[in-house]
Image (cartoon, rainbow, N blue to C red):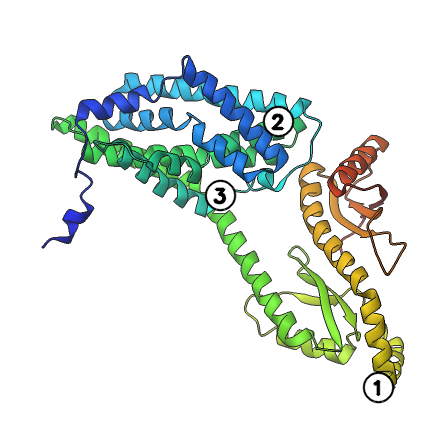
Amino acid sequence: MQINKYFDIHFERADDATIAKRLIGGAKIKGPALVILILSMFIASIGLNMNSTAVVIGAMLISPLMGPILATGFGFATLNFTVVKSAILRLSLQITIAVLASALYFYITPVQTATSELLARTEPNIFDVFIAIFGGLAGIIGQTRKTLDNVIPGVAIATALMPPLCTAGYGLANGNWHYFFGASYLFFINAFFIFFAAFIVLKGVYSLPFHKQVEEVNRRNQLIFLVIGLIMAIPSIYAGYDMTIKYSESNHMEQFIKNDINQEGRRQVIDYSLDQTNKLVNIVVIGAPVTSEEQAQLDDKLQKDEYLQPYTLRFVNSVDEKKSTMDKTNLNKSSENLETYKNLSNLYQPTYQLVSETINTMKTTEAEAKALFPFVSKVEGMPLIDNLEQPKASRYMVIIHTTSAVSDADSERIKAWLEAKLSAPVTISIEQTTSTL
């Protein structure tokens, strides 16, 4: 029994006329198709603007962008360059309409916050290339079956096309070229590798009369597309490698903190950040401070980790040696002081929880602020608390570190953006960074 017959993509293949009709017909953008394109653009833009994953998925499902891409693959595979020109022209028109219309939407919408749904489409990597290839293969194989199934909707969700274009529109409306080029790159990655997958599959399943010249043209096209694909994938390979390194560093750091820094009943790490530029690990601890002897031992252990070896530990709230000695003396008053410490811990626990939540919020806020305001280098903030027993973040104090001087207008923009994001009044302080630690 031959195993390869179970993977034969010719099984239940539709006839050539049906395949050609489906793929060429799917590239049409007149009438309902154009209306659906605009509707899907608005749905995607609103979903990105409101940070709604479900709405963004809905826009992916109804977007007609897949049609011209598959038709282009069909045209090249069958050497029907009339179809190629028509499909590329229609796809270009769809891209232009989607980007300009979404830019107009984001220009007039009162909500200008960069949501996580928008941020997710600004930094493509090699995994997006793989998704586009596998999705394109599944999509074109589904289109060549006698009976259409639910493959295309699944491919539309996996290989997002409309949301990146709308994100590019957001970048265009706000003058944020990092968003614009990042999202545009994601779209072209998805579009090209869907096209390439369609081209490869259709060469194998669509019946063409054998002709030496035709075979030579097809091989030449295949080589050209392969080279283009490799060139397009290079930035995503670097981004994927960088993402993997960051994930590994973060994972190893979490284990290092858990095993070597945290000490139950004595010390707890409440926050840390990896400064890849300066190779520093900034760590915030509560409880017993880290002495110079302990830090030397921790630094020595850190050097033995393959991912954390370049980094140096910096305990942001560590105290000097004299104060550390005094703290040790006070903590050694045994059971009476321990009971007092427990009572204080219970009292300050809600405040600690609020501060921890704010620190996590500030991490996200810093990433978004850097994307929206290129002069921002760091964001720090804390809630202003009146009642320790029932703490509530009624106002925030936020320090904005910048790489250059900030105008009053930009200060007001940052303040308004922060208040919209944090849903509370904000007092900001602008500090220009003159040197790097």
Tag 1 secondary structure? helix
Callout in the foreground (3, 2): 2
Residue drawn at (38%, 34%) of the image: 153
Q: Is residue 386 left or right of residue 102?
A: right
Q: Quadrant of the C terminus?
A: bottom right
Counting residues from the N terminus, which is met first, the one under dot 1 or under dot 3? 3
Query: Could you tell me how far apart the alpha carbons at marks 3 and 2 are, in whole angstroms?
Result: 21 Å
Q: Is residue 287 left or right of residue 7?
A: right
How far from the left and from the top, in percent, is residue 269? 71, 68
How far from the left and from the top, in percent, is residue 180? 58, 32
What kind of residue is marked 2?
Leu
How packed mark 2 is, by other alpha carbons closer than 10 Å (few <14, some 14-19, many 20 or more), is many
Tag 2 secondary structure? helix
Residue, far front: 390
Residue, far top: 31
What kind of residue is marked 3?
Pro
How far from the left and from the top, in percent, is residue 26? 34, 22
In this figure, which residue is indicated by the disc labeled 3?
Answer: 235
In this figure, which residue is indicated by the disc labeled 1?
Answer: 335
Q: Are marks 1 and 2 in contact (CB under 8 Å)?
A: no
In this figure, which residue is indicated by the disc labeled 2?
Answer: 172
